Amino acid sequence: MTPTENLTDRRPARVAIVVVRFKKQLHEISLLRALPMIDLSAVPEIIIVDNSPEPASVDETAALPGVVKYRWLGGNVGLARAYNSAVSQLQSDWTHVAFLDQDTEGLLGLFDQLAAGLSAEITLPVVRAGQTIISPCRRIGPWYAPIKRIGVTPANLSWINSGMTVARGTLRSSPFDEALFLDYVDHQFARTSLADRARVEVLWDVVLEQDYSRDTDSKQQALARFRIFNRDVRQFYRGTVAGRLWGWALTFRRALGATARYRTSAFIFSWLGAGRALDG
């Protein structure tokens, strides 16, 4: 049996849910809005870990349903640390963890599947951004490319974390890489878990919707976001000379685009600074 073979032997699972919050009102988080309509028979615990600069208000946390726990992390510690922290804080008798973004839509079908049982160490939904399938995806050399159609598991599989459900043993052997702050945390986890021979099933009939638009970012927001991207991409690709060249080109292209859009050289200087820090 290959790691990416579709499996049909579903077994009951106890699936804890982890959501990372960042600067969003609790009542606006997609999962919490959908909670009254969700089958929670397979969900022993839901935890929201908060990477925001300030914690949610007392009124917000007091309004949370009893099954939901809230933990402020003291500021933005990064996505990988937030995930690992959340898993370490789970207290229920769980067999798997499902990771949800705060703004992912279309969750009812996913929870119906979780209630029906799981058959692999890693279970993935389909995730769309508009008309593009962004997860699962395939790796072509150093490049991560969208797949064209639903139903066929691609060679050199990778994915994003939205809706990913992971078995307890896999999380123990393949924790999230805290050397990465935000970008490529998902692809690094995919790379590590597949290397450990974790079996993966794609739920092709479960489709989530994700919005990654950055059109409303101010110059300062875009610059802060680019600094994270710049460092994470170079960290992710630093293992080989070819990888470092690819990371250099990928971040330089982003810097040029942002320079043209925001009419400032700050992105180029940020790009150069991150390169010196990692190469040194």
Image (cartoon, rainbow, N blue to C red):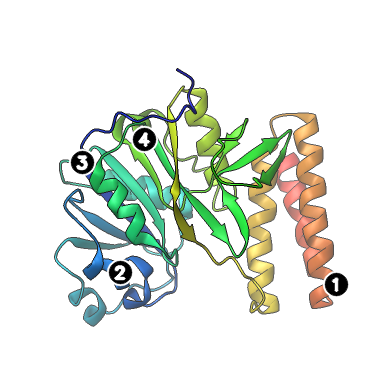
Determine which residue is flagged by label 1. Answer: 260
Residue 169 can be seen, yes or no: yes
User: Which of pointers 1 and 3 lies earlier in the amino acid sequence?
Assistant: 3
- Say which amino acid is labelled 4: Leu
Mark 2 sits on what residue? 34
Marks 2 and 1, how far apart at CA? 40 Å
Instruction: Give whichever of discs 2 and 1 has the lower sequence position.
Output: 2
In three-dimensional space, the C-alpha distance between marks 4 and 2, rounded to whole angstroms, equals: 26 Å
Q: Residue at x 19, y 56 (%)?
A: 40
Judge from the rendering whether residue 276 lies leftward or rightward of residue 33; answer left or right. right
Q: Decide which of 231, 12 is in the foreground and name it.
A: 12
Residue kind at label 2, given as amino acid type: Ala
Q: CA distance from mark 4 to mark 1?
A: 41 Å
- Which residue is the site of mark 3? 94
Give the secondary structure at mark 3: loop
Tell me the distance, in whole angstroms, between the alpha carbons under discs 4 and 3: 12 Å
Front position in the image: 276 or 31: 31
| Secondary structure of the residue carrying numbered label 2 | helix
Give the crowd class for mark 3: few <14, some 14-19, many >=20 residues within 10 Å. some
Counting residues from the start of the chain, the first of labels 4 and 2 encountered is 2
